[in-house]
Amino acid sequence: MLAITNGEVQDDFRLFAGRANPELAKEIATILGDELGKMSVSTFPGDETHAQVEESIRGADIYIVQPTCPPTNDNLMELLVIIDAVKRASARQITAVIPYFGYARQDHKSTGREPISAKLVANLLTTAGANRVVAVDLHAAQIQGFFDIPADHLTALPTLADYFREKQIEDGVIVSPDVGRAKLADKYVDMLGMPLAIMHKRRSGTGGREVKVVTEIIGDVVDKTPIIIDDLVTSGSIYQQADAIAEAGAKPAYLSITHPVLVGPALERLNRPSIQEVVVTNTIPVPAEKQIGSKVKVLSIAPLLAEAILRIHQRRSVSQVFFDQKLVFPV
């Protein structure tokens, strides 16, 4: 496995993939002009995960691509086991490339006697032997601070914004589904030059999982094409915002989402007249049966991850990837 750096071949680079999203890892390897490292990952009859590196990696820089998407605990444990295997094989440096960081929504205590599981996962990765973490669109940017090792926070915003720019939506309006996403929505506004609208919703229940009511839309959406933005869609509760904004006089909405978790009733909820298209990335695999015909559009995040991995390996600035696109983003 070889990496090309400034025209020179380097043999101290290895890219490995767990079982969570091997197709994404293969695409990254192709962009880098490389092949995936040789490793077997299996599950014993007792549900224990086993990994074995099948080539020498002594002294090499290792990059492991493994989102911790559902089944979250299985994929997280697999990542930890792979990191440990690589560490014990005398790798020089280990970078965990986690396109989707599970447990990110548990980044604070919303009520008493709760864990802060995002911090726990950060500790587990460090203890397992990771020297660096690369993630895409963390649910909260401050999760970077949970790590005692370098953490590169990438964003799919340019990938998603480019798609909408190519569609040339003349009557578009960027819609934040709640006040918490207003800052992200403002970045879309800067990149696409569209007006901004903000919706207000209140959550109730343990952990705020139940959306109680949409109360207000701030901004003009009448006869406009809304682009509702968020970092992830899990059970599809964002359909309530799409319905509410349609009732306010808007055209069917586009959803612009980085992480398509899509579990439970999500597909049924999103397959409705108020939603024109759900635009997501492949940080998480989206099999054909989850694409609702052609309603779910999957964009590739592989070029961004490949560029970040190459810059890390070459010890160049990762932030420059976004500065070149006139995007100031926490990385």
Image (spheres, rainbow, N blue to C red):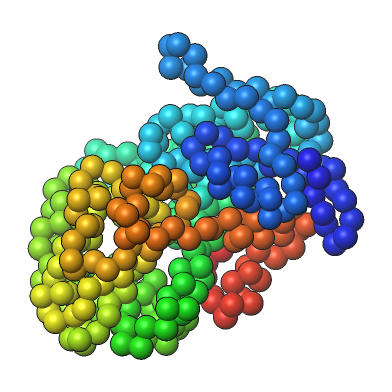
Residue 228 visible in the snapshot: no
Say whether residue 194 is left or right of residue 216.
Answer: right
| Position in image of residue 59 (x %, y %) | 81, 35
* Residue at horizontal 60 percent and vertical 30 percent from the top: 82
Q: Is residue 24 above or below residue 48?
A: below
Left or right of residue 53: residue 302: left
Name which residue lies at 43% across and 11% down.
46
Residue 272 pos. (x, y %) = 18, 61
Of residues 317 and 4, the one drawn nearer to the viewer in this rendering? 4
- The answer to whether residue 135 is above or below residue 188 is above
Query: Which quarter of the picture shows residue 164?
Result: bottom left
Number of numbered callouts drawn: 0
Q: Quadrant of the N terminus?
A: top right
Quarter that holds the C terminus: bottom right
Q: Provide residue 300's location: percent of width, then percent of height.
A: 52, 58
Furthest residue in direction right, as rendered? 8
Residue farthest toward the front in the current orientation of the protein? 293
Pick out the residue farthest to the top: 45
Residue positioned 41% across, 41% down in the render: 69
The quarter of the picture where residue 54 lies is top right
Residue 208 pos. (x, y %): 20, 51
Q: Nearer the viewer, residue 170 or 48?
A: 170
Q: Which residue is drawn at 63% across and 69% down?
A: 321
Residue 325 can be seen, yes or no: yes
